[in-house]
Image (cartoon, rainbow, N blue to C red):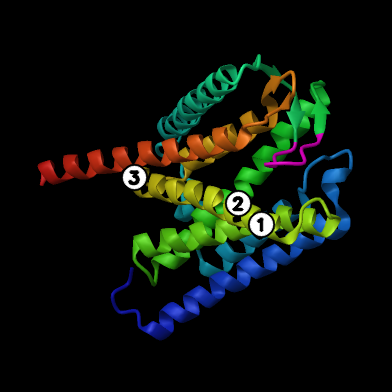
Amino acid sequence: MNKGMTLKDRKKTFEIILAIFVLCSVVKEIEFLVIKTDQTIISENIICKLFVIAVLFIALSKLGWNWKKIGFCKEGLLKNAVLGLILGASTFFLSYLTEYLVLAAMGKTPHIQFFITNFALTNQNVGGTSFKVVAICVIGNIVNVWAEEGLFRGLFFQMAKTSFTEKQSNFIQSLLFGLWHIITVIVWLLEGSINIPAACFMAVGYILLAGVLAYEWGLCIALTGTIWAGVFEHFFNNFITNSLHMVTDTGTDEMQILRIVLSNVLSLTFVLFLSRMAKKRKHREI
């Protein structure tokens, strides 16, 4: 943070961030509510993500920044990609195991199956296992992660840091990332799938779950100096959630919420531990 920044400067920075967020959100809402790309052969709301990427190019040009400035740098790519994948694989292994044990204890016969669905805590649409469906899922997730990591952990985080502390900046991008995800709940409410109390509950759940991961990925940037750990964990999490499902005789992903919550909390805990260890090591070196 620039210590010379005044309250007026901070307000202006936040207003710019908020304006970009609202613009991208409006495009996302139009796609979800009007265009409904996810109900086509694409099976993914990709227009808003491509719009976000275009906004990133324009914003970086206006600011005189490059992609390295927001964390997309060559240095540390492999090491931090491995870190992100380890975080995703380890936490999901533990969460799938926990889900399996809980379901088994309930007298069910859980087993894991691979097939593609869209990601949602409810109302999943099955896509299948064909090469085309898997390829669309992979490509869609790549575009999604590029857009969301670039916008929230990249642009918003770095813009906020010019006027706010790192912790405040991380909170800002985390809150906005949580709000970014409530459009799904709005769709369900308008379609009549859920009532208003349930929608409020689900909206809070989405904000908290997405916010926890967003905060963790912000910590990863502070820890590693790049955006790659968050990018690769984000991609891994999305793809696994889209493709690896716990099936029983009575349904599919009946306790998905348990798996997602546990995975998010574990991931944040691991990164907080790594951050503390890094601070202790740095303190000893001084």
CB atoms of marks 3 and 2 within 8 Å: no
Q: Do the residues labelled 2 and 1 touch (CB within 8 Å)?
A: yes
Instruction: Give the camera-side residue of 203 and 152.
Output: 203
Classed neighbour count for the residue bearing mark 2: other residues with Cα under 10 Å, few (<14), some (14–19), many (≥20): many
Q: Do the residues labelled 1 and 3 touch (CB within 8 Å)?
A: no
Q: Give the magenta part as a residue range.
A: 118-125
Q: Does the magenta stretch include residue 31?
A: no
Image height of 244 relative to 263, above or below: above
Q: Is residue 146 left or right of residue 225?
A: right
Instruction: Read off the residue under disc 3.
Output: 223
Q: Mark 1 points at which residue?
A: 182
Residue 204 appears at what percent x and percent y? Answer: 58, 56
Q: Is residue 151 visible?
A: no
Q: Quadrant of residue 241?
A: top right
The local secondary structure at tag 2 comes to helix
Residue at the image position 32 percent from the left and 72 percent from the top: 2
Lower sequence index among marks 2 and 1: 1
Amino acid under disc 2: Tyr
Determine which residue is flagged by label 2. 206
- Distance (Cα) linking label 2 and label 1: 6 Å
Placement of 183 over or under 258, stated as above or below: below
